[in-house]
Image (cartoon, helix red, strand yellow):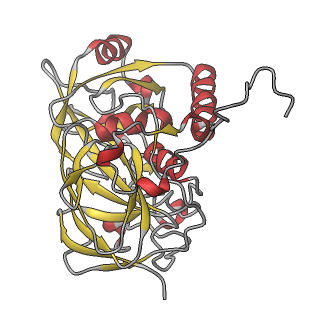
């Protein structure tokens, strides 16, 4: 029987997520999957396992969890307060979670989406090729107290590792390319869009994030006559009140609002993770530059495993001390390592 992760208590929006579903746009289903794909890559690097394994996505806050066997865990994404049997845990690191121990994950200190990864992944049944909950499409469900999740077989054994992370949890400059309807916005409107200081509105979820701003609304020529056509994740619709709305991983697949641009995939996590009120701006890049940016982002994600380093901690505070390799590099106390031929 596989190990189980038991949910003792739970925030209102904790779901199982992986890389999502490809190939269903024609049936009206977007990819879904983790709102912050980079966080999945980070968790996989910390545990030395596949990026295709499912993890728990926690929106704003986590919950309390217990496992029926010793498991390895990693914490990535928006930093949240975390303890194991009331001992604090380092975020963006891997840890041993003994059977019966209680893991508590509180509110986000910054950002929006935090992730709990488990060695072997969450092994719930596949639905249309993925384990991700896609709530707007009726696939899967949010977790609740009393849930038990089966875990996959863990092929690794190392813990106590950490990974440097670029801060993507405070908004910032978001790079965009032109969209099918960018030309419907005159040059002055496009320039004003690029120079406007936006704020992440409280109205946002896995379907989309609204941008608030001071000043006149944005409008496009003939916007009331636009026919609905295909939508892609990252499109920036200008809604009826003139506010930009960035479409996220669970967006609709068609729409009729004019789109002023499309966020680069590598910058979508910055939009998703921006907390309410965070400052954001948008900068246009041409398609060739966008291609180079995405290639660099893919290369960086693939190289994350090489950036993992041991987590430096006081041995007195390490509950999983035996999982650390403490004697690597030991030398003889009597022989000279410089002159010895052995």
Q: Is residue 147 visible?
A: yes
The answer to whether any part of residue 180 appears in the image is no
**Where is residue 263 shown, x and y percent of the image?**
43, 33
Q: Residue at x 33, y 26 (%)?
A: 221
Residue 200 point in image, percent of width and height:
20, 33
The answer to which of 121 and 290 lies nearer the viewer is: 121
87 sits to left or right of 185 = left
Is residue 119 positioned above or below 182 on the image?
below
Image position, residue 84 (x, y; %): 25, 58
Q: Quadrant of residue 166?
A: top left
Considering every residue shown, the one lying at the far bottom of the view is 1
Of the pair 268 and 336, the residue shown nearer to us: 336
- Describe residue 223's horizontal placement relative to residue 277 as left or right: right
Residue for point 81% across, 27% down: 340
- Residue lying farthest to the front in this orientation: 334
Residue at image point 49% right, 60% down:
20
* Above-or-below relation of 234 to 322: above
Quadrant in the rendering for residue 13: bottom left
């Amino acid at each position: 029987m596989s190990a189980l992760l038991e949910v003792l208590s739970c925030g209102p929006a904790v779901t199982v997520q992986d890389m999502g579903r490809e190939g269903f746009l024609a049936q009206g289903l977007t990819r879904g999957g983790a709102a912050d794909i980079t966080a999945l890559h980070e968790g996989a690097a910390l545990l030395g396992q596949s990026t295709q394994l499912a993890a728990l996505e926690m929106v704003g806050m986590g919950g309390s969890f217990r496992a029926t066997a010793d498991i390895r865990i990693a914490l990535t994404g928006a930093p949240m307060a975390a303890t194991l049997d009331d001992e604090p845990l380092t975020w963006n690191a891997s840890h041993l979670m003994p059977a019966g121990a209680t893991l508590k994950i509180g509110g986000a200190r910054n950002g929006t989406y935090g992730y709990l990864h488990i060695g072997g992944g969450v092994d719930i049944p596949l639905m249309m090729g993925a384990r991700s909950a896609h709530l707007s499409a009726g696939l899967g469900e949010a977790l609740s107290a009393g849930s038990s999740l089966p875990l996959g077989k863990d092929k690794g054994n190392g813990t106590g590792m950490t990974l440097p992370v670029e801060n993507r949890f405070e908004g910032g400059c978001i790079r965009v390319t032109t969209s099918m309807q960018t030309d419907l916005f005159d040059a002055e409107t496009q320039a004003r869009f690029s120079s406007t200081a936006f704020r992440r509105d409280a109205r946002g979820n896995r379907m989309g994030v609204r941008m608030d701003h001071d000043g006149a609304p944005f409008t496009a020529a003939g916007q009331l006559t636009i026919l609905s056509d295909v939508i892609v994740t990252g499109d920036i619709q200008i809604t009826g009140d003139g506010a930009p709305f960035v479409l996220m991983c669970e967006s609709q697949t068609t729409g009729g609002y004019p789109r002023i641009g499309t966020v680069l995939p590598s910058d979508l996590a910055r939009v998703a993770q921006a907390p309410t009120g965070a400052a954001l701006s948008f900068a246009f890049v041409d398609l060739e530059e966008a291609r180079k940016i995405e290639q660099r982002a893919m290369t960086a994600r693939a190289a994350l495993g090489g950036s993992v380093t041991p987590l430096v901690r006081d041995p007195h505070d390490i509950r999983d001390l035996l999982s650390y390799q403490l004697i690597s590099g030991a030398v003889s106390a009597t022989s000279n390592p410089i002159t010895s031929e052995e």
